Amino acid sequence: MNADPEVMRYFPRCFEREESDGIADLCEELIRQLGWGFWAVELKATGEFIGFTGLHAPTDALAFAPCIEVGWRLARNHWGQGYATEAGRAALKVGFEKLCLDEILSFTAKSNQPSLAVMQRLGMEYVEDFEHPALPEGHPLRAHQLYRLGARRWKDLGDPDTCIKTLNP
Ligand SMILES: CC(C)(COP(=O)(O)OP(=O)(O)OC[C@H]1O[C@@H](n2cnc3c(N)ncnc32)[C@H](O)[C@@H]1OP(=O)(O)O)[C@@H](O)C(=O)NCCC(=O)NCCS
């Protein structure tokens, strides 16, 4: 997944096997330390690994840090089936209902329409455009957009599964 140029199109570069494995190890270590993080996403039917989704405290010098972000990355053959939105909603549920966070942010390159669409489907609200400080001026991915979801809005949105069951008992 991390070596696929299409998956990594909105990131500065792809990762080699060793670096990708190092990131997976770091994800596991952070989950061990904190109890939460970027979790593996698996197909319920088969247990196949299809990507990751979860919560993360960004370490870059962002104007809105410290904060907790929700993020996602799926292997290309699993796009277009609603998995990122389903997994993103599960991560938000942990953030708001177990960790009792007041707000969760999400951000990506302004050109990353698929990821912005996941944020919008999750009910997150546009905050602002910003320049990502880790990328040099003039870099095509430097222009980013920030979205947020607050705990009150999360509660107001309700659980879509419950809503469907209520409408169609
Ligand atoms: C960002 C990313 C995870 C979005 O994937 P995605 O497949 O577009 O998003 P979802 O999994 O939520 O799927 C939504 C799509 O599935 C469709 N869909 C099909 N069946 C569905 C179902 N049962 N339920 C919900 N949606 C369904 C939706 O209509 C939507 O299609 P559309 O894009 O044509 O409108 C993916 O593009 C990716 O991994 N990109 C690379 C990594 C990346 O950029 N990450 C973000 C960086 S911050």
Image (tube, grey):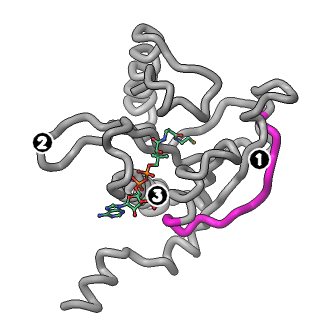
Which label's residue is closer to the chain start, 3 or 2? 2
Distance from label 3 to label 2 (Cα)? 24 Å
Few, some or many C-alpha atoms within 10 Å of disc 3 (few <14, some 14-19, many ≥20)? Answer: many
Image coordinates for residue 145, horizontal then vertical, percent: 72, 51
Q: Mark 2 points at which residue?
A: 46
Image coordinates for residue 59, horizontal then vertical, percent: 66, 30
Disc 2 residue type (three-letter)? Thr
Of circles 3 and 2, the one toward us is: 2
Query: Which residues are the magenta region?
Result: 121-132
Q: For the residue labelled by badge 1, is the local secondary structure a helix, a strand or a loop? A: loop
Q: Residue at x 58, y 74 (%)?
A: 152
Few, some or many C-alpha atoms within 10 Å of disc 1 (few <14, some 14-19, many ≥20)? Answer: few
Asked whether 12 falls inside the magenta stretch, the response is: no
Q: In this view, does 149 lie to the left or right of 73?
A: right
Disc 1 residue type (three-letter)? Phe
Asked whether 124 falls inside the magenta stretch, the response is: yes
- Observer-nearest of 56 and 51: 51
Q: Residue at x 49, y 32 (%)?
A: 6
Q: For the residue labelled by badge 3, is the local secondary structure a helix, a strand or a loop? A: helix
Which label's residue is closer to the chain start, 2 or 1? 2
Q: If the image is split into quadrants, where does the C terminus sit?
A: bottom left
Which label's residue is closer to the chain start, 3 or 1? 1
Q: Image height check: is 138 above or below 130?
A: above
Q: Is residue 62 left or right of residue 85?
A: right
Q: Are marks 3 and 1 in contact (CB under 8 Å)?
A: no
Disc 3 residue type (three-letter)? Leu
Q: In this view, does 104 lie to the left or right of 46?
A: right
Q: Mark 1 points at which residue?
A: 64
Q: Residue at x 36, y 58 (%)?
A: 82
Q: Mark 3 points at which residue?
A: 92
Image coordinates for residue 117, horizontal then vertical, percent: 55, 59
